[in-house]
Image: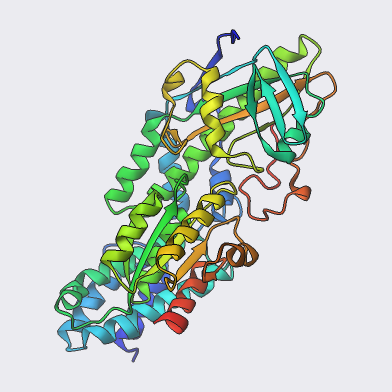
Amino acid sequence: MQTPDPVVFKYAFADLPVKTGWIEKLMGYAEGESPDPIAGMIDEIFTEAPAHTDIRGGYVVPVQFEILDKSHIKVNFLDFYPGKIITGSLRKSEKIAFFLMTAGKGIEAWSRERIRNGDTLAGYIIDLLGSEIVESAVDLMQVELEKEMEREGYHITNPYSPGYCGWLVKEQQKLFTFFPENFCGISLSESSLMIPIKSVSGITGIGRDVKKTAYSCKICDVQNCVYRDRKVLT
Amino acid sequence: MENILDKLSHCIEFGKINLASPYPPDMKGQEGADELAKTALDQGNPASDILQKGLVPGMEKVGVKFRENKIFVPQVLMSAKAMNAAMVHLKPFFQSGEIERKGKFVICTVAGDLHDIGKNLVSMMIEGSGWEVIDLGVDVQTSKLVETIKENPGCVIGLSALLTTTMNNMADTVKEIKAEFPSQVIVVGGAPLTDEFRIEIGADFYSPDPQGAVEYLNTVVA
C-alpha cells in the first residue's frame, strides 16, 4: 500500500525551548542550584551545542489504521503490538502518524570525545542535553502535526515510542518501513537500536475524539521510567 | 593533625582531583587526590593502605550520599575522577600483585540497550571499592558474556537495562548464562527493575543503587 511522503522538519538549537535549568533538574538539582563546577559547565555546553547538532525529523500518516485487539494494531497491512497501554491510548484514533526525529550524530560524538579526554562530567551533561534536544524537537513537531490535523477537525494523542510502555524496540524495524531508507540520517542497528543514539521514533493517534493526557503512569508499574509524569508540551 | 589517608579520603568524597583543580571551591589551592596519593607512597604508606584506608572509605561515603539523594551523578563523577587520579599512582602495585583486588566484576548493558550512565556509575563505585572491573560496554550479546566468564573464572557478572522492553533480553541472558554456568553470580540493576523481577529471572542480587551492589559484593561474594 502506498505511503505518503514524510513531512520533514529541521530545527536549529535556538528553536528549541531547552533551558539550562532543565538539565539541572534532570541531574537531580533544583533549577539554578547545581553546585560548582556544574552550572558553569552547563552554560559552556549550551553555548557550544549549536555546532554539534543536526536536528531533523518528520512524520507520515499512513492510509490504513485499525485496532485489532487490546494490544494489537494494523497499519497498512503490517501488524504492530504496542502493548495494552499504548493501544488503549490510541483507542479512539481514526488514523495514526509515525514519526522519527534525531539530534544528529554530532552530539553523541561530542559527548564521547569529552569522556575520552577525561571529562566525564561534561560528557554526561552533553548526553543529557542530547536527550532533551531530541525530546523537545519531537514536542515541536507534535505541535505542527496537531495544527495540521486541526485543519481537518482532528486532535492528536501523546506520542509513544518503542521501548516504553511495553512496546518492543524490535518493532522499530516495521515502523522504519514507512520512511525512506536512512531518513534524516537515521538507521537501525541489528538489535533495532537507532543510530544516531539521540533519536526518537514513535506513534501518535489522530482522531476527532482523542486528546493529549498526562502520561498513563498510574496504570504502569515502572516507577523509574524516564517518561513518568513528563509534561506534554501544548 | 589529620592523617594523609584521611585527607585523601576527603578529596575522593568531595571530588578534589589535584592542586590545579578549582573545585570544590572551599578546597581551592589545596593538594588533591593526585598529589596526596603520591605523597602517601613517598612517605612509605603501603599501597594497599592507600587503597583500603584512603580511596575505599572516600568512595563508600560517596555511594551512601548518592543513595540518600544528598549528592547526584555529577558529584559522583567528580569523585570518580579524583579516585582515578590517585589510582594512577597505585597502578604498578596492582600489576606487581602487591595490592590484591577483591575479585573481578564484569559489567555491561544487555543486548538492545545503549543506556550506559547507570552502568558507568556502578562500574566506578565497584572499582573504587577494590574490585577489578571489566567493562564490556553497551548492547552486549550473551555469547560475549559467556566467552568472558570462560576467560575469567570466578568473576561476578553485572547486567544493566534501562528500558522495560530490554528487561526481556536481560531475562534471556540470565537464563542462558545460568544454563551453562549454574553457580555464576549475576547482579542486575537498572531503572525499571525490581527485586521481584530479579527473583523471576533467577539472578542473584538486585540493588536500586550502586552502593547496594558494592555492599553485596564486599560482604557476600568477596
Let me know if residue A181 appears in the view: yes
Residue B77 position by quadrant:
bottom left
At x 61%, y 63%, the residue is B200
From the viewer's perspective, is residue A189 above or below residue A156? below
Residue B188 placement, left or right of A81: left
Q: How is the image coloured?
A: rainbow
Let me know if residue A100 appears in the view: no
At x 26%, y 65%, the residue is B151
Residue B123 position by quadrant:
bottom left
From the viewer's perspective, is residue B12 above or below residue B135? below
Residue B96 position by quadrant:
bottom left
Can you give x and y, in whole percent of width and height, for residue A52 in the image? Answer: 38, 31
Q: Residue furthest front?
A: B179
Relative to the observer, which residue lies in front, A15 or B138? Answer: B138
Relative to the observer, which residue lies in front, A118 or B2? Answer: A118
Relative to the observer, which residue lies in front, B222 or A234? Answer: B222
Can you give x and y, in whole percent of width and height, for residue B114 in the image? Answer: 44, 45
At x 48%, y 41%, the residue is A129
Can you give x and y, in whole percent of width and height, for residue A127 in the image? Answer: 44, 44
Q: How many marks?
A: 0
Can you give x and y, in whole percent of width and height, for residue B177 in the image? Answer: 43, 62
In the picture, the quarter occupied by the N terminus of chain B is bottom left
Q: Residue furthest bottom?
A: B1
Q: Residue furthest right?
A: A209
Relative to the observer, which residue lies in front, B15 or A74? Answer: A74
At x 51%, y 50%, the residue is B169
In the picture, the quarter occupied by the C terminus of chain B is bottom left
From the viewer's perspective, is residue A148 above or below residue A114? above
Residue A157 placement, left or right of A109: right
